[in-house]
């Protein structure tokens, strides 16, 4: 019988922690070992961990300074002696037969076993997130053809290919440890699961997708803003994640296009929490996926699109510096807008973003800029996204 290691990273969740731990220690599958990693909690979470460790010798407890979920998961995974690793977030819980359900698949030595997620607000308000691919076993050939090319993002669904959550999966320990060790080089909270799961999926041979709904993922109260969206370094960390995964996938164009879509969607999600402007239909979105955060940016065009671009970038503190130019700058009577002649001597900017919808006019503008400006390392971006 395969042994399962369960890592529960914990930070200030004493309200839910007992329910979470109970759902793991009461599993019908008994050959498990559990790491409770108290990541610097300031509530009673650490005390609860120690109490459970005294009752169940399968539990190991780590108390560490707050260092984030990636570090907590890695430190927990390292101390467990097991065949498969899985994770449970400390405010969630799992069905009591979760691990027993996959006894056969573990004995078949399948690399990754994944089941479906129940989004849980309360007993009367819960719904299932289904897999985006048929539920079945995929051998090496099937996986490489049917799943691997689409694991990150399905453009037609505007959603992940394989859900990046680590907590609805059983994964061979050696695969998890390698991915976790590599991810210690980055400091992210939003997308931390992606940094583990997608590099693993890139290299596996076999996958089993189950139709069983076994993981209860607790949902925030309506209107509550996730803490990672409040992070003042959100855009910086999002780009770190994007760059990290781009490198993991060796800058393969197919996966880069999927990461571009994820990047754009993430910016849009974050914007929706903070301004009604971004949730309205028939407006424009700054090409965040083409222009990394904390760059020096020139916006060309002071019309409707230029105004939207400028306000989005400015309100989100996305750029180090913004220069806003327009051929007819004088008629706008706006001191933020300057003459395009300034471009003749510009050297300290990274991107010029063309805020013009008409492709023909945009191309004429790009030709004009190329003729008058010494661009050197300055990149010109024209990518109108209307939603």
Image (tube, rainbow, N blue to C red):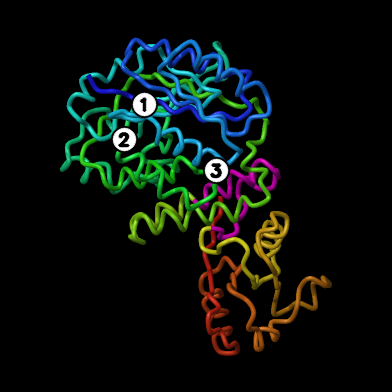
Q: Which residue is mark 1?
A: 5
Q: Quadrant of the N terminus?
A: top left
Q: Which residue is mark 2?
A: 173
CA neighbours of label 2 inside 10 A, class few (<14), some (14 to 19), many (20+): many
359, above or below 109, in the image = below
Q: Which residue is mark 3?
A: 190
Magenta segment includes 177: no
Image coordinates for residue 297, horizontal then vertical, percent: 64, 70
**Discs 2, 3 touching: Cβ within 8 Å:** no
Image coordinates for residue 328, horizontal then vertical, percent: 73, 78
Tag 3 secondary structure:
loop
Tag 1 secondary structure:
strand
311, above or below 174, in the image = below
At horizontal 52% and vertical 47% (from top left) the residue drawn is 265
Q: Which residues make up the magenta segment?
A: 263-288
Structural distance between the alpha carbons of marks 1 and 3: 24 Å
At horizontal 20% and vertical 20% (from top left) the residue drawn is 104
């Amino acid at each position: 019988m395969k042994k399962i290691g369960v890592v529960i990273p914990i930070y200030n969740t004493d309200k839910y922690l007992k329910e979470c731990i109970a759902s793991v220690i009461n599993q019908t599958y008994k050959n498990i070992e559990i790491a409770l990693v108290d990541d610097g909690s300031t509530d009673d979470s650490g005390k609860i961990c120690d109490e459970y460790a005294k009752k169940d010798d399968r539990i190991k407890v780590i108390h560490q300074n707050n260092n984030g979920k990636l570090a907590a998961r890695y430190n927990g995974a390292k101390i467990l002696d097991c065949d498969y690793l899985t994770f449970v977030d400390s405010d969630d819980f799992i069905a009591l037969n979760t691990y027993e359900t996959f006894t056969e698949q573990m004995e078949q030595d399948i690399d990754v076993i994944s089941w479906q997620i129940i989004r849980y607000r309360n007993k009367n308000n819960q719904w299932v997130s289904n897999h985006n691919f048929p539920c079945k076993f995929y051998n090496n050939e099937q996986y490489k053809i049917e799943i691997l090319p689409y694991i990150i993002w399905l453009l037609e669904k505007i959603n992940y290919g394989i859900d990046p959550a680590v907590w609805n999966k059983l994964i061979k320990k050696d695969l998890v440890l390698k991915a976790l060790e590599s991810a210690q080089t980055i400091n992210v909270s939003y997308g931390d699961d992606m940094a583990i799961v997608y590099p693993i999926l890139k290299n596996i041979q076999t996958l089993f997708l189950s139709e069983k709904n076994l993981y209860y993922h607790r949902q925030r109260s309506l209107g509550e803003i996730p803490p990672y969206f409040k992070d003042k370094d959100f855009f910086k960390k999002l780009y770190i994640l994007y760059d990290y995964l781009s490198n993991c996938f060796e800058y393969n164009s197919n996966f880069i296009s999927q990461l571009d879509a994820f990047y754009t969607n993430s910016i849009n999600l974050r914007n929706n929490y903070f301004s009604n402007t971004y949730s309205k239909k028939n407006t424009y979105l700054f090409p965040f996926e083409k222009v990394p955060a904390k760059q020096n940016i020139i916006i060309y065009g002071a019309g409707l699109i230029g105004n939207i671009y400028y306000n989005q970038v400015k309100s989100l503190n996305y750029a180090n510096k913004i220069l806003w130019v327009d051929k007819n700058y004088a008629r706008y009577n706006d001191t933020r807008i300057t003459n395009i002649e300034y471009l003749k001597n510009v050297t300290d900017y990274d991107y010029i973003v063309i805020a013009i919808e008409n492709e023909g006019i945009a191309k004429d503008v790009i030709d004009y800029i190329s003729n008058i400006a010494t661009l050197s390392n300055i990149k010109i971006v024209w990518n109108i996204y209307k939603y």
